[in-house]
Amino acid sequence: MATTVFKRPASLSTNVTHYCPGCTHGVIHRLVAEALDELGLRERAVGIAPVGCSVLAYNYFTIDFQEAAHGRAPAMATGLKRTRPELIVFTYQGDGDLASIGTAEIIHAANRGEKITVIFVNNAIYGMTGGQLAPTTMPRQVTTTTPRGRDVAEQGHPLRVADMLATLRTPSYIVRTAVHTPAMIVEAKRCIRRAFEYQAQGRCFSLVEVLSTCPTNWGISPAESTAWLQNNMVPYFQIKEFKSPEAEG
Amino acid sequence: MPRVTVDKERCKGCGLCVAACPQKVLEMSREINLKGYFFSCPVHQPRCLGCRICAVVCPDVAIEVAVNGTQYHYFTY
Amino acid sequence: MGERLLMKGNEAIGEAAILAGCRAYFCYPITPQTEVAEYLAKRMPEVDGVFLQGESEVAVGYMLFGAAAGGRKVFTTSSSPGVSLMAEAMSYLAAGELPVVIGNVMRNGPGLGGILPCQADYFQATKGGGHGDYHFLVLAPSSVQEAVDMMILAFDLAEKYRNPVMLLADGMIGQMMEPVEIPDFPEVRSANIAGHEDWATTGACGRKQHLVKTLYLKPEESFAHNLKLKAKYDRMEAEEVRFEESDTEGQLDALVVSFGTMARICQTAIESLRARGLKVGMLRPQTLYPFPGQRIRELAGQARMVFSVELNMGQMVEDVERAVQGRAPVHFYGKTGGLVPIPEEVAAAILAKVEG
């Protein structure tokens, strides 16, 4: 008598995604869906999709969704959560959406302590538009708008969003994790689940920064991408829990 | 006995499951699916531990894992 | 209520929204409309509503989207430069069929401009500040009382058409104090948008996904969406044109077309011209979109000339010309920069053309 020990969560739809082979969006979508299912939040969850590769995220979840303009998801989440506080509202944003055009919105949503959950997918590049410089692109990384590699003298250093938001006084859950190894995926799921738990308790703002791969625009295979992330991104983007509401005291 | 099933039409041939499997159960096939991807195949099923690592790393929910009888609990997921 | 109060325009606009049932207001300070925010900062909590000052008008535009897509009545007020910042959001709100109300208390521009009254956002309001084929229904009050009545109407029309509505006021209406009769409603209106159960993101409990989006990558779907919006605008043009006429019977020496507070100044100017024996009438559009083009065209057939009088460098005059279709010469008189003509100046300008 066979028991299934792994299958698709109910919050995820059956649609095959448009994401590239090996793109970790698929994994992160699944972790979010698993967290919502396990916490029994599916029927009151509303996701807010960004502009970026995951603009079509709403096709891959069975929960209600809104589609935001580039960078504005935290503002939309604020409008929805303040007027319907019983909903579990989360944004799902890439590094261009959150750390470039959306810097004002994310800082102020975090600073006001909006009781929302932000899933921040950091793959150090602009994926959807074909591989341009992102605020989180690594020094010397080649992109289509930095063909000679990111020059920190011209474009500055990569932004460390989790580190920056952790300096705000407002209590929150700020954590950076990754999904490039099985062990990290298990850890990332725990972080995402905890972030949704805090919202279910009405406790605080949460941001889970997830270091992710972009094989197509990095120009290497999915398996090579996991190694590139480990060797290049992990030393700079520290994987750690920066802030939690319990630690505030 | 643990069983891994790969939905070959969902698979995009990314190879992450092949790289991640601790038992080298999976290999890329030499045939292509309808979209033209070489898909993953549980070639060495008997070696499977039912650890679910392949399903955990798969970005396309293409893998299902089922077990019979006693199963070691390798990690909480 | 049903009482008569002396109210500042900005505060009256805020109170009117609450009367309409709105319990959510997101805002950003900008002169000359900040009093709406200051009034509602105290008033909204009294009615268990949501008040939030956002980080910019850009963000506020999307807070409206989030709340409205969740099925709640919501509004904001701003002034010209702030409304420019909301341009993208306005396009999204119309595309998403969200019944929000945006109040623009116009000030002089362009750029940072000044803080004095102006009507230079006519193009922005009626031709779309944002991108794409869309319209806001635009209401233009000329008194504090009318601003109150139109705010309530704005929420009703927004709900009826599932389309955003703009209240186009100016700094004079915002700042001045006038007697207002507060409407007396038999019951408190709902804070939810009527019919939101069919489309709003309230949580997929026992139903399939509700999605509020504006992305249509497939051209056939995008075209179909545009046709759907156009059908609404056609209905608005057929059913929601509103205007006031005065002294428009018989043959006219001049027909004046003017909106908002400028129309009140024109009214005084016209009285002085009538006292001199001239036959001058006025049509005051109350909806700028849909524009009362048909009635203007009819009246142009009775008039020797048509004057568009505005507090700008010539914006509504283009719609007047388009409506008149050459039946009579169309002239423009206007001032901007925050300078407001006195009735004598307007009368002199009309007289010069009528006699010249």
Image (cartoon, grey):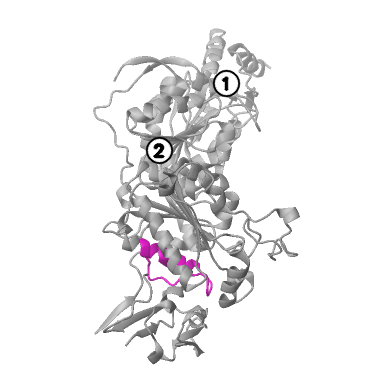
- What chain is tagged by disc 2? C
The span picked out in magenta is A12-35
Do the residues at pointers 1 and 2 share their chain?
A: yes
Q: What element carries label 2?
A: loop
- The residue that label 2 is drawn on is C74
Q: Is mark 1 on a helix, strand or loop?
A: strand
Mark 1 vs mark 2: give the one in front. 2
Residue placed at 30% from the left, 49% from the top?
Answer: C197
Q: Does the magenta stretch include residue A27?
A: yes
- Count residues near mark 2 (Cα–Cα under 10 Å), then give few for <14, some for 14-19, many for 20+: many
Q: In which quarter of the image is residue A124?
A: bottom right
Residue C65 appears anywhere in the view: yes
Amino acid carrying mark 1 in the image = Ala
Residue C279 appears anywhere in the view: no
C341 to the left or right of C209: right
Image quadrant occupied by the N terminus of chain B: bottom left
Q: Which of A82 and A204 is in front in this view?
A: A204
Q: Nearer the viewer, residue C318 or C44?
A: C44
Amino acid carrying mark 2 in the image = Val
Which label's residue is closer to the chain start, 1 or 2? 2
